[in-house]
Image: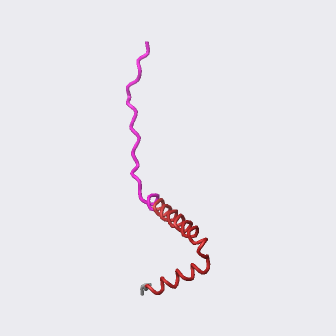
Amino acid sequence: MSIGIWQVVLILLVVLIVFGAGKLPNVMKDMGKGIKGFKEGMDEGQTAASPKKVSKPKKASKTSKKSK
């Protein structure tokens, strides 16, 4: 089941009626910011969930400084 062209037209018409032509650019800009933030959050979640390679600390050398 997919959305056809008439369903998209109907949704856009309802949005235009509800928000009006004056507020529509602001609404779409805010919606774009929300989607962008959501995608960034999803990317952060995936990088946090992926296992990270933990490097072992280097062992200190056993050479000591000679005192005078």
Q: Measuring from the top left, give residue 2's x and y in whole percent.
A: 42, 85
62 falls in the magenta region? yes
Give whichever of 28, 51 is nearer the camera.
28
> On the picture, is 23 further left or further right than 61?
right
Front one among 55 and 44: 44
Residue range corresponding to the magenta coloring: 46-68
Indicate the quadrant where residue 30 lies.
Answer: bottom right
- Residue at 51% x, 65% y: name it: 38
> What's the magenta bit mostly, secondary-structure-wise?
loop
Image quadrant of residue 65? Answer: top left
| Number of numbered discs visible in the structure rendering | 0
Q: Residue at x 46, y 87 (%)?
A: 6
Is residue 33 found left or right of 64 in the rendered image?
A: right
Instruction: Indicate whether 37 appears above or below 62.
Output: below
Q: Which residue lies at the image location 42% right of the left edge and 59% below the top edge?
A: 50
Residue 65's place in the image compared with 52, above or below, is above
